[in-house]
Image: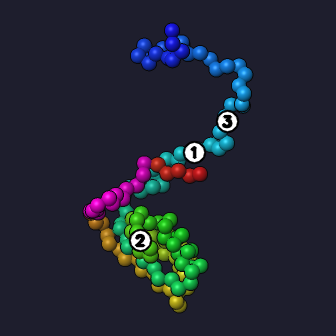
């Protein structure tokens, strides 16, 4: 009889147990992965509006900081122009975060509301959507 369990019969009793002494200790996970599903905190896509966010920053340090802020809200974009689907609260948070990073005397930021639109994609583009869960690590 084979030591591989029979899947067709639904039995797993004919497996051989692992040897008592292994030449190496058994592997144990070093971290734990937690999946957080929070539908109460995340609004579905229809409750969000599409915005086009663009910036022009003169200082390289502020440029990296603005890029970091925008990537946290964006679902797509290139270089200094990003597409963001935002609720009103997220829009206010984005504006205050960008205001804290930029120098209003020399830098520019534009947040253009495009409203509720049907997103059409071409080529290999993927239409934006909210994931079923968020990973918080």
Considering the numbered disc 2 on the image, is that residue within a helix, a strand or a loop?
A: strand
**Residue positioned 71% across, 25% down in the render:** 22
Magenta stretch holds residue 120 = yes
Q: Is residue 87 visible?
A: no
Please give left or right for residue 84 compared with residue 24 in the image: left
Label 2 and label 1: CA atoms lie apart by 31 Å
Q: Badge 2: how crowded within 10 Å, few (<14), some, or many (20+)? A: few
Q: Residue furthest bottom?
A: 105
Please give left or right for residue 29 compared with residue 136 in the image: right
Label drawn at residue 34: 1
Residue behind mark 2: 78
Q: Marks 1 and 3: CB-CB under 8 Å?
A: no
Q: Marks 2 and 1: CB-CB under 8 Å?
A: no
Q: Is residue 111 above or below residue 87?
A: below
Considering the numbered disc 3 on the image, is that residue within a helix, a strand or a loop?
A: loop
Dominant secondary structure (helix, strand or loop) of the stretch shown in magenta = loop
Residue behind mark 3: 28
Label 3 and label 2: CA atoms lie apart by 41 Å
């Amino acid at each position: 009889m084979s030591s591989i369990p029979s899947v067709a019969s639904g039995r797993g009793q004919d497996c051989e147990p692992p040897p008592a002494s292994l030449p190496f200790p058994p592997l144990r996970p070093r971290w734990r992965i937690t999946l957080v599903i929070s539908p109460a905190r995340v609004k579905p896509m229809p409750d969000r509006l599409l915005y086009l966010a663009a910036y022009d920053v003169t200082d390289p340090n502020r440029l990296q900081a603005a890029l970091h802020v925008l990537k946290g809200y964006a679902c797509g974009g290139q270089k200094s122009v990003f597409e963001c689907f935002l609720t009103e609260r997220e829009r206010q948070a984005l504006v205050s975060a960008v205001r804290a990073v930029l120098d209003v005397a020399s830098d520019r930021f534009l947040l253009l509301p495009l409203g509720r639109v049907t997103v059409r994609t071409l080529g290999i583009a993927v239409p934006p959507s909210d994931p079923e869960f968020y990973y918080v690590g």
